[in-house]
Amino acid sequence: MAAGVAAWLPFARAAAIGWMPVASAPMPAPPRDKKRTQDGLIILNVSGSRFQTWRNTLERYPDTLLGSTERDFFYHEETNEYFFDRDPDIFRHILNFYRTGKLHYPRHECISAYDEELAFFGIIPEIIGDCCYEEYKDRRRENAERIQDDEDSNNNNDNVPLDLSFRESMWRAFENPHTSTMALVFYYVTGFFIAVSVLANVVETVPCGKTQNRVEESCGDRYSLAFFCLDTACVMIFTVEYLLRLMVAPNRFKFVKSVMSVIDVVAIMPYYIGLVMADNEDVSGAFVTLRVFRVFRIFKFSRHSAGLRILGYTLKSCASELGFLLFSLTMAIIIFATVMFYAEKGSSASKFTSIPAAFWYTIVTMTTLGYGDMVPKTIVGKVFGSICSLSGVLVIALPVPVIVSNFSRIYHQSQRADKRRAQKKTKLARIHAKKSGGCSAYSQYKRNGLLADADEEASKEAGQALVSQANPIFDTHHHHLLHCLEKTTNHEFVDEQTYNTSCLEVTMVKQTSRSSSISSATGGGGGGGLSSCCSRRNKRKSFTVANANMASRRGSVQELSTIQIRERPVSNSRSSLNAKFGETMPLNSSEQPYLTAAVINRPNQPLTTPQGNDSASTHDYLQSNIVRVSAL
Amino acid sequence: MKCCLVKWIIASTAPQGPDDISESELEMATVRHQPEGLDQLQTQTKFTRKELQSLYRGFKNECPSGLVDEETFKMIYSQFFPQGDATTYAHFLFNAFDTDRSGSIRFEDFVIGLSVLLRGSVNEKLRWAFNLYDINKDGYITKEEMLAIMTSIYDMMGRYTTPSVKDDAPFEHVEKFFQKMDKNRDGVVTFDEFIETCQKDDNIMSSMQLFENVI
């Protein structure tokens, strides 16, 4: 908790006097105060700048350097002060942390210097206050990235370590052409052949002259052999390159799945398929189609161009926005195409023969292209056509800058959301850890405390401090305060886990009952006034009674006494086990005619579930048991 | 019926509506309170000079304006009881310290209250406790007032306790308390009955001395 609040602990302890008159149990003894030193000033000399503060201020955080005995290592006898050879500017913030309980990060300081100082003085950066935490994390991330980049470029620029295998060195050559001359040569050669191949694809469709039949023929047909040789050469180079990459890839499966390898395959497959199917006239149409895929060779340039890769990544990352644009466009196209079709249905010789045919008109109009190959002739058609072109401007022109700004906004936002989520997680974890840590520290204190009462002497002789050294005075006093509260209410604190598991256990323990007497007993068992330990969840289970004979009941009750029953005297047959805590109030049968005897057994005995009622569950965490002893 | 009465008691001593709160918050922000001089406080309380100094330092650290309003008080007190809800009990405590009902605790109120609790005689401490329980300060502790106090104490325990706090646990506790304290069975506990019973109870008397060394 905040250091400032520690100053209020004496007040909280004093106010505990308000519990004393109503306490139901005697209070625990207060912790033995260690010899209290007079609160004095401490001088901290940091590279010449003198800081002074109270000793108590520093000791608020005993797990840091300044708050523990570790500072004695820096004590300078001659000048009676503690000397630290560190940065005084940053030390100012560290000292403020002790004073106010909040650690701030100064923006003008270098992040690594600050981190070093924090590490030296034993302060974990996670406690930086909310006001400065985001800035701190940002700077830290930038720094980490910078270090990572440096490392990467260092790795790349290093001379090839001699112990790299041939395979690994080949892979490096492929991925980073600047590493060796051979790799560079290979890089440029493949680039050249990609360009040549693409150019050949383009040129072979150019008309090159006329044949004898005065038919225009393309260059590809005229010089088919030359083009074929060129194509073969290119494909061979590409194939060799692909196979080489496949061979030396460290993770072949991953390589095969990657985008670049897919492009490579798509670029060279058409040639081989063409080879196989060359003489079959029926599939020549398909063969022609395949040649289209040769244009994918141009994508092989993306290995050579970082810009192309970035563009591809950008498109991929704002795919959802583009998808939405496409969707809204499709909606508008369908609407307007339908309207135009029905508007133009009446006119003669209308080009709008069907709605799909009208799609073309709508697209051309909405993108403000306006080819003019399809124009509406009716007045209604013209009206709707103009509406279409106007809305086209809106539909197309507006979302694009919105998408662009959306993209940048969403990108930054997601970064911030990730930061905040990570921060929230660590914050919740911190709170939870503090709570559970506090609870476990408290139970440890109680155990130590009880031990202390018992055998103080022995431990003194053993020379060990009973209270664990990690507990500062504040925690001891705070735990004593909580202990007093427990005694006042006669309940104990447990942590969440134990509480939950205890509830589960309770529901597991079922009641057995003699089958014969079950039916007769149920009548009185209704509405048993017991509350299970999950009463706050409003699960009221009723106890059914078994009129078992005394021996078995006593035996079972004996079992019960092993299940965490406190000072509950087992009286006789009418075991008047009371639901009231604190005292036993023996019940007279005259006063309470509806008491039912409860028999509770451990679950290892065969369970017979009683009639149709809810199965009873024992509440072995009640001081007294369920109890209504009935007169049967 | 009982619960309604208890709730009414709590509500009647609760702070005013939202308008007043925001106004008083504004005032709080600009008001600064300086305590009386050290010498005067020394005469009014049983603390030494050094103790007063260290008390004020802690007080001023938490409340730079020199005044503690109820919300801050509740927040500070709740930090000591993370498992439960200490706000209702903190509210009663606040009223016990804020003797002039000004809505905020000044350093003088704080230190005078602490002086009674830590350095006062047993009778003075019992008087303070009686004052705490007597919510409307009419000189009588009724069952409803006691139930309100008891419920707030049990609220501080929170959910995760063993044994589990049942819903009528505070009520049972109050019944026991009244059986012990209310001698003439008139349904209220007066100060004399309270003092008399406490003085006869060794547990209570010894626990009153418990926190002598707090400062």
Image (spheres, coloured by chain):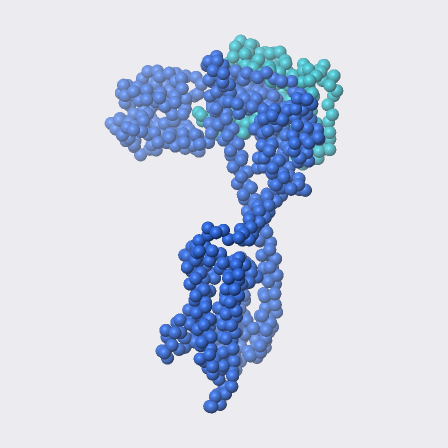
Chain colours: A blue, B cyan
Residue situated furthest front in the rendering:
A162
Q: Residue at x 41, y 22 (%)?
A: A623
Percent x, y of residue A46: 67, 30
Specify the quadrant of the image occupied by residue A626.
Answer: top left
Specify the quadrant of the image occupied by residue A111.
Answer: top right
Q: Residue at x 51, y 18 (%)?
A: A465
Exactly how many numbered labels are in the figure? 0
Is residue A188 depicted above or below B131 in this figure? Answer: below
Percent x, y of residue A601: 31, 26
Q: Residue at x 65, y 18 (%)?
A: A38
Q: Nearer the viewer, residue A627 or A241?
A: A241
Percent x, y of residue A212: 47, 90
Percent x, y of residue A487: 50, 19
Q: For the N terminus of chain A, give its image quadrant.
A: top right
From where the camera sits, is residue A595 visible? no
Residue situated furthest top in the rendering:
B200
From where the camera sits, is residue B80 visible? yes
Q: Residue at x 51, y 86 (%)?
A: A209
Specify the quadrant of the image occupied by residue A513.
Answer: top left
